[in-house]
Image (cartoon, rainbow, N blue to C red):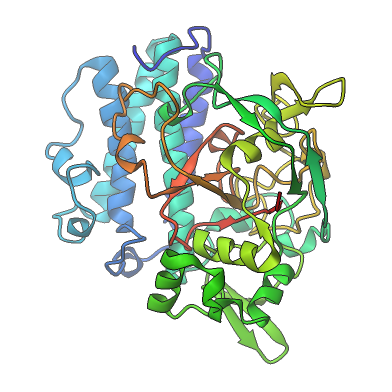
Amino acid sequence: MGILENKHYVLPASRLAQVVEEAHEHTLACIADLHDAQLSVPLMEIVNPFAWELGHVAFFYDVFLLRILEQRSPVMEGGDDLYDSFKVDHDDRWHLPLPTRRETLEYTERVKDLVLERLASHEPDAGETYLYLLALVHEDMHGEAFTYMRQTLGYAMPSFANSVAGSPARDIGGGPLPGDVQVPGGAMRLGAAPDAPFTFDNEKWSHVTEIRPYKIARAPVTNSEFEAFVEDGGYFRRELWGYQGWTWRSRTGACHPVYWRRGKEGWMRRHFDSVVPLEPHAPVVHVNWFEASAYCNWARRRLPTEAEWEMAASAEPANHGSGVTERKRRYPWGDDPHYAGRANLDAHHSGCVDVGAYAAGDSAFGCRQMIGNVWEWTASAFYPFPGFVVDYPYKEYSAPWFGYRKVLKGGSWATRPRFAYNTLRNFFQPYRNDIFAGFRTCALD
């Protein structure tokens, strides 16, 4: 299997069955409370029909797991003509003869049962483990997409964001976390190592990158910090935006973040179907790369490069105090995947918490919330690493998107933990402000 480098990472069938069942229940919870009319969303570039997205998640297990491992025929006849995202153009998804809601749910249940049947009778090797994880992480991505689509459409918060044990985000506290940390720079291996438990093709493989010393913010930019930019007329100062950014701002008429509203006593923001006071110390969220860059120009700062972000998140200072060690952490706090008390992930709160919260998740250099709360835009365009090859089986994951998209790192409050680790590279068009994205800054050289 060309995808496989770590030939020793195997998960037992019982554990995989558990997480497949849990991921399925989470996906169903993304739409369970929506009535049929809400599933029929308007044609927009940044959303998919909910019924299509639900069927597509099951289709991925069918194509990239069951058909590969069992050489079986498709679970749904004609499913490829409905749910293959690289054969069905985005706008055409509103005109497909999609199954009914009941039929779609039955399809997802049938696929899940077939996956569990295989796990009940067969212990996976490392190659099969990778395929299970690929399908699971794909489902995780769409779970977050369901969540930010509900925000886009003004629907209620998903039920799981209200029912998970924990406090509402506004009750966590933590306050601001101003200031920079000094990162000494040096040689670092950017990207994933071959012994990583799971990687996407665009993370392959780690390669030496020289990074100059730099200062990076301890925390992402907050609402109150971004408010100062808005109040200073930052959206109307052309010199801050660059050509493409100003073109976007002029075309959209944006004069503040997309969900902000002026209230009688100050700024408010729409959070799903509610309007809430702007939380001063929470990170600004739902801003695009153009907005982040304009803020940086206004503040006389800059966005970190992908390599700078990854060094601050994963490297450790060398013992002699100059440069960094060879060792890289998988998460800012270390290699332990348990994030409880360390990161705001998996909708354990109903939104973003203050940037000063979760001190236990700090990186070795003292940067906070590099995993969770908000995805963070970087200055880097999404390009392949040296030696990149299109990997079997998911050939279309990265290769079609290299170029114009920008790299985001970290993860948001709605990100599932499997999709949040230091070397992961998320990527979106620079105009996307619907995703749960914010940013942190670096000092100018």
Q: Is residue 304 above or below residue 204?
A: below
Residue at the image position 23 percent from the left and 48 percent from the top: 103
The residue at the point 40 percent across, 13 percent down is: 127
Give the quarter of the image for residue 24.
top left
Looking at the rendering, which quadrant does residue 311 occupy? top right
Q: Position of residue 95 (x, y in %)?
A: 15, 60
Residue reaching furthest front?
445
Q: Is residue 80 visible?
A: yes
Provide residue 142's location: percent of width, then percent of height. 42, 46
The picture quadrant where one finds residue 330 is top right
Position of 250 relative to 225 (above/below): below
| Residue for point 64% across, 40% down | 309
Residue 23: percent from the left, percent from the top? Answer: 48, 38
In the rendered view, does 128 fall on the left or right side of 208? Answer: left
Along the viewing direction, whichever of 364 and 383 lies nearer the viewer: 383
- Relative placement, left or right, of 431 versus 98 is right
